[in-house]
Every structure is written in structure tokens, then in C-alpha cells.
Image (cartoon, rainbow, N blue to C red):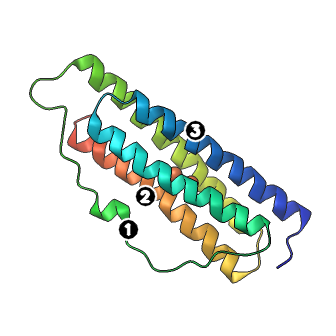
């Protein structure tokens, strides 16, 4: 598999985004006040690490195969934390973390969608499309968390 210089640059840029996501979710896992949200950020961080590794493999000349897998977002059913007695300050802070991460996911998802059009190989397109779907699912899970906690 031969990538052009332009294609390599695109993949490196996507990888830099993944690195940022890994860093962000690692920090936010520590910063989140609610345990449920910490767990969610930890789960997402693991997928960002997988994305980073898939792109490394692609850069080294092998495209990882995309197999069927279950949707994390579909299964995600968070129990609300911010009902009854809670500190408003904690809820406001966690809401801020959620809004910030959804914004990041929106940006990264768009980047994958744009870059995918620069590749002719079906398997590379499938890989980028698969990652893009997972980015959308990250936003969906965070959105579900916000909804059950009345943060919308
Ligand atoms: Fe990612
Ligand atoms: Fe993501």
C-alpha cells in the first residue's frame, strides 16, 4: 500500500487530533466530579487509543481490517447522578466538560469525513469511516449522559 505525501500528512494530522483526544479524556477522567462520567470518559479514551494505533499501522503501510462490532452508544444507558440532592457547582462543572468534549467530537468527526474523500482504496475509506462512526458515538454517549442528568 502506497500513500502519497499529501495522504500521509492528512493521517498525521488526524493522529495529532487523536493524541489531543487521549490527553483530554485522560485529564477529564480525573477532573469529572461524577463517577459515572469518569467511567464514560475512561471508556472513550480507550477507543481514542485504538484510533491512534490504527492510524500508526496505516502510516507504516498496513491498513487494519474493519470487522463488525457492537455499538457502544446503543448499549449506553447511564443512571442519572444529578437528581435529588447534589451540589449545583459539581453539576455545572460536569456539564461544561460534556459540552467541551461534544464540541471536540464534532470537529474530529468532520475531519474524518473530509479526509476520507482523499483516499481511493476501499479498505482505507472503510477504516476512516469506521473511526468517524465511533467519534459520533462518543458524542452520542455524552449527549445521553447530559440528557438523563438534565443538563441540556
Ligand atoms: Fe478518535
Ligand atoms: Fe472520539
- Does 1 appear above or below 8? below
Q: Residues within 10 Å of mark 2 (few under 14, many from 20)?
A: many
Q: Cβ–Cβ below 8 Å for labels 1 and 2?
A: yes
Q: Quadrant of the C terminus?
A: top left
Nearest the eye: 60 or 145: 60
Mark 1 C-beta closer than 8 Å to ligand 2: no
State the residue lying farthest toward the right. 5
Residue 68: image location, x then y, percent: 46, 80
For residue 99, side relative to residue 58 (left or right): left
Q: Nearer the viewer, mark 2 or mark 3?
A: 3
Task: Tell me which numbered mark, 1 or 2, is placed earlier along the sequence.
Answer: 1
The residue that appears at 62% across and 49% down in the rendered structure is 18
Marks 1 and 2, how far apart at CA: 8 Å
Left or right side of 60 for 73: left
Q: Position of residue 90 (x, y in %)?
A: 29, 22
> Which residue is the site of mark 3?
23
Q: Earlier in the sequence, mark 2 or mark 3?
A: 3
Residue 57: quadrant of the picture: bottom right
- Residue 137 is tagged as 2
Q: Which residue is mark 1?
A: 71
Amino acid at each position: 500500500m502506497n500513500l502519497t505525501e499529501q495522504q500521509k500528512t492528512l493521517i498525521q494530522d488526524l493522529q495529532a487530533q487523536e493524541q489531543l483526544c487521549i490527553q483530554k479524556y485522560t485529564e477529564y477522567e480525573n477532573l469529572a466530579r461524577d463517577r459515572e462520567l469518569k467511567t464514560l470518559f475512561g471508556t472513550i479514551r480507550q477507543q481514542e487509543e485504538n484510533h491512534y494505533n490504527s492510524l500508526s499501522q496505516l502510516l507504516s503501510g498496513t491498513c487494519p481490517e474493519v470487522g463488525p462490532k457492537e455499538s457502544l452508544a446503543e448499549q449506553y444507558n447511564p443512571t442519572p447522578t444529578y437528581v435529588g440532592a447534589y451540589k449545583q457547582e459539581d453539576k455545572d462543572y460536569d456539564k461544561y466538560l460534556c459540552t467541551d468534549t461534544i464540541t471536540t467530537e464534532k470537529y474530529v468527526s468532520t475531519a474524518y469525513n473530509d479526509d476520507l474523500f482523499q483516499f481511493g482504496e476501499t479498505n482505507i475509506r472503510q477504516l476512516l469511516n469506521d473511526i468517524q462512526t465511533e467519534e459520533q458515538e462518543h458524542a452520542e454517549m455524552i449527549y445521553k449522559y447530559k440528557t438523563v442528568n438534565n443538563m441540556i
